Image: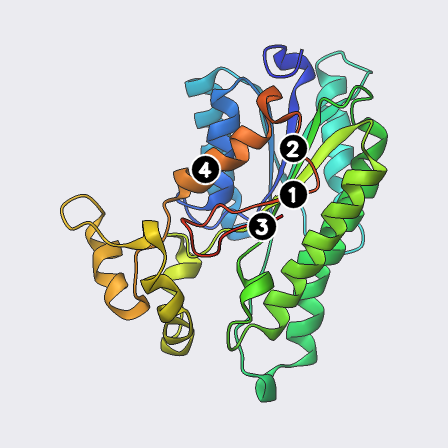
């Protein structure tokens, strides 16, 4: 039983919680609504209270087990500390047969700089969190994945992996690497889990609203030709409508992205693996 058996459905969401509108929060709520127990991770001390509030909401609203773990996926021991916390949670519930059904790789950092201004610190931090972190987490969770193909792994990538936006040499490179690893995992873990990526375009999160004018100008031509990014005054939130003046179109809502991740984690997606699912409103059209 995949989702209905809550005790067996401990879902691992790797995300740094910034605000209550982040993609990771939306994914956590979506999966909790389907009956999955949730483990969320966060990095900074400033997110501790936000994580606690989310755990409380998930347990009271959706009647699931939820746990928050402070860990830095950019370090070499962050992944192991997350799995250790999961094992402790199982033990506290009298369970010795640890099983992790779902892994969502959502933790990520982005540094937008032109080629001449990229620093080694930016490069190292980005690749440590966005690439090495998912690799180490997959190594840590592999022993606890199901053995009947019911497991689900979803990597949150980006259209930046293929579009070649100005100022995203590093960020785009990390997301391309994540997609490449996911395709390999889809083959190596075929008897354990499906492994897919999604590639959102702009999403209405704190990161989006911090975009520089240079970044907005770079994506403007793409946004203007994206079918679902056309703004709808009176329907879309006013900050999306206002932001579209600079970027050429509205970003996705968090729920629109979380819904695609949630779908990929259900039994209905059992015949999908090794794919990059285009969850970007038509920003790019998938051919895989």
Q: Are marks 1 and 2 in contact (CB under 8 Å)?
A: yes
Q: Are marks 1 and 4 in contact (CB under 8 Å)?
A: no
**Residue 156 vertical position relative to residue 153 in the rendered view, above or below:** below
Residue that mark 2 sits on: 272
Task: Tell me, for residue 26, which label it has, or none.
Answer: 4
Question: Which-is-in-front pick, marks 2 and 4?
Answer: 2
Q: For numbered disc 1, what is the local secondary structure?
A: loop
User: Upstream in the sequence, badge 1 or badge 4?
Assistant: 4
Residue lying at the far left in this picture: please name it.
Answer: 234
Q: CA distance from mark 3 to mark 2?
A: 14 Å
Residue that mark 1 sits on: 275
In this rendered view, identify the residue nearer to me: 139 or 77. 139
Residue lying at the far bottom in this picture: please name it.
Answer: 116
In this rendered view, identify the residue nearer to me: 4 or 56. 4
Q: CA distance from mark 1 to mark 4?
A: 22 Å
Q: From where the camera sits, is residue 80 visible?
A: no
Callout 4: 10 Å neighbours few (<14), some, many (20+)?
Answer: many
Question: Which residue occupies 59% across, 28% down?
Answer: 38
Question: Which-is-in-front pick, marks 4 and 3?
Answer: 3
Q: For numbered disc 2, what is the local secondary structure?
A: loop
Residue 216: x and y, percent? Answer: 37, 71
Q: From where the camera sits, is residue 184 visible?
A: yes
Q: CA distance from mark 1 to mark 2?
A: 7 Å
Task: Tell me, for residue 287, which label it has, or none.
Answer: 3
**Residue 96 vertical position relative to residue 243 in the rendered view, above or below:** above
Left or right, residue 251 beside residue 30: left
Residue 221: x and y, percent? Answer: 37, 70
């Amino acid at each position: 039983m995949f989702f209905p058996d809550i005790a067996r459905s401990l879902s691992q969401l790797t995300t740094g919680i910034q605000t209550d509108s982040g993609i990771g929060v939306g994914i956590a709520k979506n999966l909790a609504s389907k009956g999955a127990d949730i483990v969320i991770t966060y990095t900074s001390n400033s997110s501790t209270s936000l994580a606690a509030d989310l755990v409380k909401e998930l347990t009271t609203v959706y009647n699931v087990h939820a746990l928050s773990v402070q860990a830095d996926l950019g370090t070499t021991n962050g992944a192991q500390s997350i799995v250790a916390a999961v094992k402790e949670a199982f033990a506290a519930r009298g369970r010795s047969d640890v099983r992790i059904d779902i892994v969502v790789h959502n933790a990520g950092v982005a540094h937008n700089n032109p080629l001449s201004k990229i620093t080694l610190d930016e490069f190292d931090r980005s690749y440590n969190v966005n690439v090495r972190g998912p690799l180490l987490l997959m190594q840590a969770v592999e022993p606890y994945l199901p053995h009947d193909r019911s497991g689900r792994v979803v990597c949150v990538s980006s259209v930046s992996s293929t579009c070649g936006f100005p100022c995203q040499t590093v960020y785009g490179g990390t997301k391309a690497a994540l997609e490449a690893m996911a395709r390999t995992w889809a083959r190596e873990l075929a008897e354990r889990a499906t492994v897919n990526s999604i590639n959102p375009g702009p999403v209405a999160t704190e990161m989006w609203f911090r975009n520089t004018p240079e970044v907005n100008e770079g994506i403007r031509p793409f946004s203007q030709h994206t079918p679902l990014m056309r703004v709808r005054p009176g329907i879309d939130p006013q900050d999306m409508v206002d932001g579209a003046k600079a970027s050429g179109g509205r970003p996705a809502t968090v729920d629109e992205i979380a819904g695609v991740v949630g779908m990929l984690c259900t039994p209905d997606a059992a015949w999908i693996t090794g794919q990059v699912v285009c969850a970007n409103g038509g920003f790019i059209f998938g051919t895989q």
